[in-house]
Image: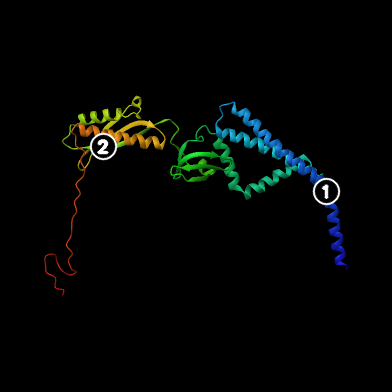
Amino acid sequence: MNYIGTITDQAQDMFRGFLEALPSLAIAIVILVITWIAAKFAVRIADLLTGKTKLRPSLKNLVDTMVKLAIWLVGLMIALMVVLPGLTPASLIAGLGIGAVAIGFAFQDIFENFLAGVLIMLREKMRIGDIIECEGIKGKVEHITLRETHVRKLSGELTIVPNSMIFKNAVEILTDETMRRHEVVAGVSYDTDLDHAADVIRKAVESVENVDTGKGIDVFATTFNSSSVDFLVRWHSGSKPRDMWESTDKVVRAIKRALDEAGIEIPFPYITHTFKEKVPMGTEPGEPSTGG
């Protein structure tokens, strides 16, 4: 049997088939290039249309992605039908349906994050620019894609979070409102008139410019501590972490200054240490050591 001749004939048939398919491949490449250009123009048109609306940035990203995806799906289907003339739209859609099931099982996590990304973008809450906290990750939402969310930590690091984690777990949105309640504990000595101390603390907090006095200021005597009576002081200020630290700093300084001016003592606990004499093993305390 002439194996070399058989292999040569098959190689020639494959080469002839490739040459016959070259026009179809060239047309398919042209279709893909046109699809790429059409997708870019379609996204620009979508940006112009959505730019005139009040859509959230995350929804604008979703619209752009869906428009691009739809055009690429149509372009790929046309290119496949050109390369494989036997394919029809019905058979291609049926094949895509069967393939989607298999791909879905193989790439379950990817599709889970994809669907979670769509739902997150459709949410009314958690917008780009919000400060969030989820599963120990706290930072600013910089970008939301169909697979992941980019969260910039307050210390500067960028964390890429899978959308499924944000969708499945509780998310605390710290900047959902422009104002947020903050609190600090202030202690006064036991010989202090508590009504007078509370009035001094309240006026001190009211004098801070970052505090929203319209929402009220709470000064509650809460605890008999070891050396002081503690007040829980609560006020409203900006919701961003930076606003919280700045207002807390000014409130603490104002309370300290006001209590000093009023002659009210801010006590501190006395720290005592108990020392035990080292006693050799087998010897009772007070007995002399028998060791050399």
Percent of width and height locating residue 104: 63, 46
Asked where in the image residue 222 lies, by quadrant, the reply is top left
Q: Is residue 142 above or below residue 272?
A: above
User: Which residue is at 56% across, 37% downward?
Assistant: 119
Q: Is residue 83 visible?
A: no
Residue identifier under label 1:
21
Q: What's the amino acid at mark 2?
A: Ala
Q: Residues within 10 Å of mark 2 (few under 14, many from 20)?
A: many
What's the CA distance linking mark 1 and mark 2?
83 Å
Percent of width and height locating residue 71: 70, 37
Name the one closer to the observer, 12 or 111.
Answer: 12
Percent of width and height locating residue 173: 45, 36
Q: Is residue 231 above or below residue 102?
A: above
Quarter of the image containing the N terminus? bottom right
Residue identifier under label 2:
186
Mark linked to residue 282? none
Q: Is residue 211 above or below residue 79?
A: above
Q: Is residue 273 left or right of residue 79?
A: left
